[in-house]
Image (cartoon, rainbow, N blue to C red):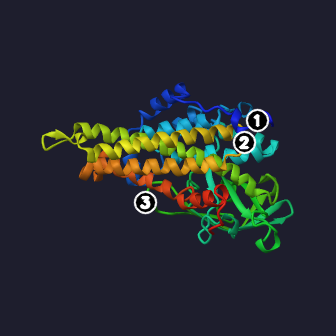
């Protein structure tokens, strides 16, 4: 779209868009039933076979331009892939970072960086699934991060620590946000941040240490430590001190993409609970006949449909290159709420059997809960809306 494009020019598709992609993803997911995910969850193992299947089908290269071997699909299509994975009971979060990091790399990477890395990422030769942003002492206060990079000739020397850096052990590359100018030397706190594309294979054991971080769900997350790690200056993305803008593009894409996962989760929970409610007989009648079962599921369905509309709008605005911060945040808020309420309704519908691992409800319930916290807390979204949308005083 041209520079004169406005939100009024953007159309939002209704109904089951990208039907061919949806059907293809459903066929892939049929090969990875609940037993596959239960086994991984018990062993805290990475879904290598599932990720390979998505890679071989070209879906992890969905956003990469055709000239680099990708499918060059719109963000909405990539989101549909994730939605269908989760609606089928799979867990695409194991690989979704390879999609949302493209928001930074594609918009701010140099032609040389794209030519060097994107074809190998598209083919599956390289994995870019690690996103180093959060730190243990600053959390979501991103501009206060302490990891520093100092220029030293044709390299930068990096020192610091990241936490909740998922899939660092399974990635070849990491998108890393650091501070290149101290906080006390800048006018705006969003200045002085820079983004690097770190080659984990070259740095591991040479100033880079990765440790597993055991968590409530099998998210393959880690702590990452930098001790005089050297990164080539040519791996700087978007220019020194311009990293916050680069990361924002990645974050808007991230929030839109993971919101699709929440919609898929909600679909799975509602479908699974409705089926069980029709089959489970207590007091000589199906429990779905009881309004105490019906109403929470009906409300969860309504919330899912409303969240889906906001999500479609956010994806359309992002694709048009228009401001979408408000819409991406609202989509993340509404979809994560819809998924969690559907998860609660599904758990309550199953009663004691919801705790039985063979039903997959407890595992998926645990997985859905994280969306209230990551990749951004619902409270932070509410603070964003209060300040930037409603014009109230900054709360933090």
Query: Residue 5 — which label?
Result: 1
Name the residue carrying label 3. Answer: 216
In the image, taking residue 184 as reference, residue 379 lies left or right, namely left
Contact (Cβ within 8 Å) of mark 2 with mark 3: no
Q: Is residue 223 visible?
A: yes
| Residue farthest to the top, as pictured | 20
Q: Which secondary structure, mark 1?
A: loop
Residue 195 position within the rendered picture, expressed as x and y whole percent measured from the top left: 74, 56
In the image, taking residue 71 as reference, residue 29 lies left or right, namely left
Contact (Cβ within 8 Å) of mark 2 with mark 1: yes
Name the residue carrying label 2. Answer: 322
Q: Residue at x 38, y 44 (%)?
A: 299
Q: Residue at x 73, y 57 (%)?
A: 244
| Residue farthest to the left, as pictured | 284
Whichever of labels 2 and 1 marks the residue nearer the N terminus, that label is 1
Q: Nearer the viewer, mark 3 or mark 1?
A: 1
Instruction: Give the CA distance from mark 2 to mark 1.
Output: 8 Å
Residue 51 position within the rendered picture, expressed as x and y whole percent measured from the top left: 52, 41
Residue 329 position within the rendered picture, expressed as x and y whole percent measured from the top left: 60, 51
Q: Is residue 171 visible?
A: no
Q: Nearer the viewer, residue 267 or 199?
A: 267
Q: Residue at x 82, y 68 (%)?
A: 187
Q: Is residue 8 above or below residue 262?
A: above
């Amino acid at each position: 779209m041209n520079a004169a494009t406005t939100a009024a020019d953007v159309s939002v598709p209704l109904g089951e868009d990208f039907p061919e992609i949806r059907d293809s993803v459903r066929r892939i997911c049929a090969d990875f039933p609940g037993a596959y995910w239960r086994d991984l969850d018990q062993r805290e193992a990475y879904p290598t076979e599932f990720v390979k299947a998505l890679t071989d089908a070209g879906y992890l290269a969905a956003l990469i331009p055709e000239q680099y071997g990708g499918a060059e699909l719109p963000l909405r299509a990539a989101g549909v892939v994730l939605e269908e994975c989760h609606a089928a009971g799979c867990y695409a979060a194991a690989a979704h970072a390879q999609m949302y990091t493209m928001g930074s790399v594609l918009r701010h990477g140099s032609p040389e960086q794209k030519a060097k890395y994107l074809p190998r990422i598209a083919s599956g030769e390289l994995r870019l699934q690690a996103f180093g942003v959060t730190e243990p002492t600053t959390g979501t206060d991103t501009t206060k991060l302490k990891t520093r990079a100092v220029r030293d000739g044709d390299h930068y020397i990096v020192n610091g620590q990241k936490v909740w850096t998922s899939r660092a052990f399974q990635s070849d590359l990491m998108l890393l946000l650091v501070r290149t100018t101290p906080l006390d030397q800048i006018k705006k706190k969003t200045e002085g941040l820079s983004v690097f594309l770190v080659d984990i294979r070259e740095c591991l054991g040479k100033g880079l240490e990765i440790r597993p971080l055991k968590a409530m769900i099998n998210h393959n997350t880690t702590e990452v430590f930098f001790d005089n790690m050297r990164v080539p200056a040519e791996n700087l993305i978007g220019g020194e001190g311009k990293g916050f803008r680069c990361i924002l593009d990645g974050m808007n894409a991230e929030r839109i993409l993971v919101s699709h996962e929440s919609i898929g989760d909600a679909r799975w929970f509602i479908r699974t609970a409705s089926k069980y409610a029709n089959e489970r007989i207590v007091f000589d009648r199906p429990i779905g006949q009881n309004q105490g079962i019906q109403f929470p599921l009906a409300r969860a369905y309504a919330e899912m449909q409303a969240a889906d509309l906001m999500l479609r709008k956010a994806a359309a605005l992002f694709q048009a290159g228009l401001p979408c911060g408000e819409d991406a945040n609202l989509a993340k808020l509404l979809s994560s709420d819809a998924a969690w309420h559907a998860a609660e309704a599904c758990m309550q519908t199953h009663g004691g059997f919801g705790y039985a691992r063979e039903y997959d409800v407890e595992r998926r319930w645990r997985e859905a809960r994280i969306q209230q916290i990551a990749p951004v807390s619902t409270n932070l979204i509410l603070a964003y809306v209060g300040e930037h949308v409603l014009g109230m005083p900054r709360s933090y």
